[in-house]
Each structure stands twice: as structure tokens, then as C-alpha cells.
Image (tube, helix red, strand yellow):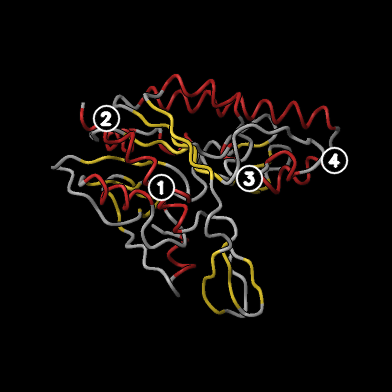
Amino acid sequence: MINKYQELDVALFDYGVYAIEGITNRLFRGPAVDRRHPYIACIGAAQTFGRFCSRPFPALLADRLGVQVLNLGAGGAGPKMFNSPNHLELLNSAEFVVVQVFSGRSESNSYFDNSKGGGRRGVRLKDGKVLTFEEFLREFTVSEPTKLVKQVINETRYNYVNNMIRLLNGIRRPKVLFWFSRRLPKYDPDFTTVSGVLRGFPQLVDDEMLNEIRPWCDMYIECVSSKGLPQKLWPSQHEIPGTSLNMGMLFNRYYPSPEMHAEAADLLAIACRRLLSK
């Protein structure tokens, strides 16, 4: 079992990672919860895990509500990663579940298959080469006509919506859908470039997709912020994945800052108190 963020960020952060029985391929963000007592569960990607943050929003939410919060965030995660018996057992034992809106990079299409892991990395079907979704798309936008690029992106989005709905149907507890991003959901894609297609996290997901997903949840909370970015990290002579290097100092320009996590926890606490009161 591994946790890549703990290995990369050990110079400044201890994420308290630990194993959960029955889930053998990853370690989760601490602290662990005592599942004999009530708890809330949060699922999502690196934003829920809380990379470069000592107290991510699930931990802050526990403080604000006085209830244990199980942080199941995993870097690069998509809905398929959590639609498994062991994950669903954890989620369906919670009081309710906060579901972060995942990136659309976690989905497969007719040219790229990442169904095995349900994350960013998959196989390009024409040659079996293992790539991230960005690497696949970078080559695809150059080699294929824009009409086909648009068709494949629409297919990817369709698969994402269907897998999100499958996951939400599998979670039988109340659900809070959580948009946590530096951008608003609505955007107009440019199918000629990778950045124009993906935009910021959650990549590929727009307001039309959200409108299809939201009815399957009990509440929807939106936190759009860039407060605290760029975030100064630690001195280094080399970049590490997910950072930028400027004059011997690493900076976080992508993941939510501690200030953004505090905003997220404040917004979520309002909705979560309503669910707990029921």
C-alpha cells in the first residue's frame, strides 16, 4: 500500500495515513474514526484528502460539528473508485456522505480505458500504452480532427455522469454534493487545446453535467475560491509533482490552500447541521 502525497510531501506534512481493513490498494488520510460511533464520510480526490494542508475541510468539519469525519479522499479519484463493496459498506454506515465533484479525467472512452483503477491513468487502446488522461488528450488533440476530439470528450462526459449516478444510487445515506474549485461550473470548451478542453479542476465537468447529477443528492454546496494561492511551501532545488519552483522555493498553485479549506468547512457545516438535526 502506498500514499504518494505522504512520500512526496514528508518534508513539511504528516498526513497521518493509515490502512482501512478490506481496502488493500491505498492508505487514507488520518485521523482514523471509531466506526462503532456515529461518523460522517467524505469522498473525493486530492482536494478532499487535503494535500499541502495540515487541517483539510473534513477535519475542520469534525471540529465544527463535534462528530467524527472519515476522510476517504484519494488523489486522482473518480466515481468508479468508490463504487465497490468495501467502500460502499463504509459509506452506508455513515450518518451522511459528502461527495466532492470528481474530475472528468477519471473516465474512459472509446480510445482510452482507465476502468481498472478509476483514476487519471489508463491505457490508450490503439497501442496499449499507459498514459494519464492529459497525456492521451495532448496527443489526441494534435493527431485527430476537432470534430472527433469533441465527440470523444462528449462520450467521456456521458460516461462520467452515468458513473456518478451509479455511485450515488449505491450510497443509501443522505448525500451532499460538493463543488470545490477555483472556477464556476459553467464554461465554454475549446476543443483544439488540452487546457481549453479540461479547464480547472474538476476537469471536463460543467453546469450541464451538474444539472444531471444534482437530483440524485439531498443537497448541493458550491465553494469557489482561490484565497491563499499561491501557497508557499518549503525550500528545494527541485520541483516535485504538483508544485512549481521559484528562486529555490516550492509553491502550490493548484491544490486548495488552507484558507480555501476553511471556507469549504464553513459552507459545508451549515448544510451538515441540517442533516444531523434530522
The tag earlier along the polypeptide, 3 or 1, is 1
Q: Amino acid at mark 3?
A: Gly
Which numbered dot is residue 73?
1
Pointer 2 residue: 275
Within-10-Å neighbours for mark 2: few <14, some 14–19, many 20+: some
User: Which residue is denoted by mark 4 in the rendering?
Assistant: 143
Question: Which of labels 2 and 4 is toward the front?
Answer: 2
Q: Position of residue 178 (x, y in %)?
A: 44, 36
Q: Whole-Å distance between the Cαs marked 2 and 3?
A: 30 Å
Residue type indicated by callout 2: Leu
Whether residue 47 is situated above or below residue 98 in the rendered picture: below
- Rounded to the nearest angstrom, the CA distance separating label 3 from label 1 is 18 Å
Query: Residues under labels 3 and 4: Cα distance?
Result: 23 Å
Percent across and percent down for residue 12 are: 43, 73
| Mark 2 vs 3: CB contact within 8 A | no
State which tag comes first along the sequence, 1 or 4: 1
Query: Badges 3 and 4: C-beta atoms under 8 Å apart?
Result: no
Disc 4 residue type (three-letter) = Ser
In the image, is residue 8 above or below residue 123? below
**Which residue is found at the position 31% from the left and 37% from the top?**
86
Local crowd size for mark 4, using a 10 Å CA cut-off: few (<14), some (14–19), many (≥20): few
* Badge 1 amino acid: Gly
Horizontal arrangement in the rendering, residue 247 relative to residue 14 (left or right): right
Image quarter hosting the C terminus: top left
User: Of callouts 2 and 4, which one flags the residue occurring earlier in the amino acid sequence?
Assistant: 4
Instruction: Residue 42 in the image: state x and y as whole percent.
Output: 35, 42
Q: Which residue is mark 3?
A: 200
